[in-house]
Image: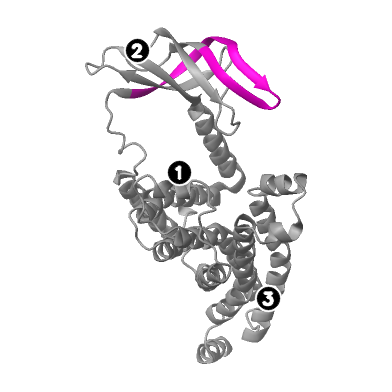
């Protein structure tokens, strides 16, 4: 049964997956900065169960909740497992930062220890414990992908993991080190495009045409992002948490370039998706009609691209809109004039982010159709030789 299954797997898929897995392992060795920078060995993270909560010191004024929760917890992991202790949870009146616990909740707790590391000084309630839920959600998604897409789903999982690793291990650390964000982001996205497309589409003319179309679309998006960001006088400081980095020892980073990089990184997935759809459609047309002319094949690709772009741009708008829904609701609720809203840096940043990304998506259709017409149909001399051989 195993031999029968492996015979169905193209050897090129085995090679590509092996190379990708080696790259994933290699990147896994690279320090990411999440845990490696935590040098304070007298603090440890652990999971704790909330045994009881005293809310008598909390004040509620309208939607604002301030004060201190008195919490009793039991340590569930590590060297202090089973110990119970009292601590506090301070509420500062900001819902996006505050966390409210109740009896039975699981919490992520950081324990401050003495220098001898055998006694707890204080337990800091970080947030609700969600690690197990996150792992379950990821595994559930991967399992569903395997059940629905089979071998293609497995390759999609490999590309998903590779994408996460290259972002966490290469892209973001490079930003922090001050490497040109536009250059490194374009390099990373190009690598991701090649890996994902060739893993899914294989080392074939279909994969090549999709890659060429994606590359041209991404390059156009980069140029548009640079031009429009400068024209709109956008600094990139509107991105959440980025400005805080300037005051945390990272004054060398370029917020504008990071903002520009974020535009084409965010749209790259949709660009790859559309390019592969068009390339796969052109491949099917060519397989069914091998005598089709290059112009006819390109027109077929453009026809497919027009229909796909019509919904894909709206999909991209809806995907981006979730990030600024609350902001627009605030402006509407306060009665801010629309012209004022349109000229605010926050809104202009989102407009550039949305429309430049969508513009690159529109252009990927003709790029892929042109690339496909060149890649799928061999030169005229080869076609004449092939036809002569058939006639003989």
Q: Name the residue carrying label 3.
A: 302
Q: Nearer the viewer, residue 388 or 17?
A: 17
- Of the residues under marks 2 and 1, which one precedes in the sequence? 1
Q: How is the image coloured?
A: one colour
Above or below: residue 108 compared with residue 294: above
180 sits to left or right of 341: left
Q: Tag 3: Cα neighbours inside 10 Å, few (<14), some, or many (≥20)? A: many
Whole-angstrom CA distance, mark 2 to mark 1, is 47 Å
Q: Name the residue carrying label 1.
A: 2
Percent x, y of residue 222: 51, 69
Q: Residue at x 65, y 85 (%)?
A: 295
Q: Nearer the viewer, residue 91 or 137?
A: 91
Residue range corresponding to the magenta coloring: 44-70
Whole-angstrom CA distance, mark 3 to mark 2, is 64 Å
Above or below: residue 178 compared with residue 230: above
60 sits to left or right of 244: right
Q: Residue at x 29, y 12 (%)?
A: 119
Q: Tag 1: Cα neighbours inside 10 Å, few (<14), some, or many (≥20)? A: few
Q: Name the residue carrying label 2.
A: 80
Q: Magenta segment, principal secondary structure? A: strand
Residue 171 appearing in the image:
yes
Q: Assign a secondary structure to mark 1.
A: helix
The image quadrant where one finds the C terminus is: bottom right
Percent x, y of residue 25: 33, 46
Q: Residue at x 56, y 13 (%)?
A: 104
Residue 198 appearing in the image:
no
Magenta segment includes 182: no
């Amino acid at each position: 049964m195993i031999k029968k299954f492996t015979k169905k797997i193209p050897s090129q898929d085995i090679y590509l997956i092996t190379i990708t897995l080696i790259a994933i392992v290699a990147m896994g060795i690279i320090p990411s900065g999440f845990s490696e920078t935590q040098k304070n060995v007298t603090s440890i993270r652990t999971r704790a169960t909330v045994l009881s909560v005293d809310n008598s010191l909390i004040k509620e004024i309208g939607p604002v909740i301030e004060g201190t929760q008195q919490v009793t917890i039991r340590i569930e992991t590590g060297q202090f497992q089973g110990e119970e202790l009292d601590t506090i949870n301070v509420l500062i009146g900001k819902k996006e930062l505050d966390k409210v616990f109740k009896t039975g909740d699981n919490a992520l707790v950081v324990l401050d220890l003495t220098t001898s590391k055998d006694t707890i000084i204080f337990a800091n309630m970080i947030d609700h414990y969600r690690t197990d839920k996150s792992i379950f959600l990821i595994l559930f998604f991967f399992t569903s992908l395997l059940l629905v897409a089979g071998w293609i789903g497995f390759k999609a999982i490999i590309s998903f993991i590779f994408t996460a690793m290259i972002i966490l291990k290469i892209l973001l650390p490079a930003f922090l080190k001050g490497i040109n964000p536009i250059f490194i982001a374009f390099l990373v996205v190009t690598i991701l495009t090649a890996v994902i497309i060739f893993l899914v589409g294989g080392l074939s003319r279909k994969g090549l045409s999709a890659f060429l179309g994606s590359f041209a679309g991404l390059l156009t998006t980069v140029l548009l992002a640079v031009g429009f960001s400068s024209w709109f006088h956008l600094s990139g400081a509107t991105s959440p948490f980025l400005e805080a980095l300037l005051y945390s020892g990272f004054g060398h980073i370029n917020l504008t370039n990071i903002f520009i990089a974020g535009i084409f990184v965010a749209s790259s997935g949709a660009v790859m998706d559309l390019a592969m759809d068009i390339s796969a459609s052109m491949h099917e047309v060519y397989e069914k009609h091998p005598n089709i002319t290059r112009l006819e094949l390109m027109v077929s690709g453009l026809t497919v691209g027009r229909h796909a772009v019509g919904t894909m741009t709206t999909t991209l708008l809806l995907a981006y809109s979730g990030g600024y829904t609350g902001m627009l609701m605030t402006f509407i609720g306060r009665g801010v004039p629309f012209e004022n809203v349109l000229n605010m840096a926050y809104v202009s940043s989102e407009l550039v982010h949305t429309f430049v990304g969508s513009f690159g998506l529109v252009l990927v259709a003709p790029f892929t159709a042109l690339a496909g017409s060149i890649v799928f149909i061999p030169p005229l001399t080869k076609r004449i030789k092939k036809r002569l051989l058939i006639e003989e």
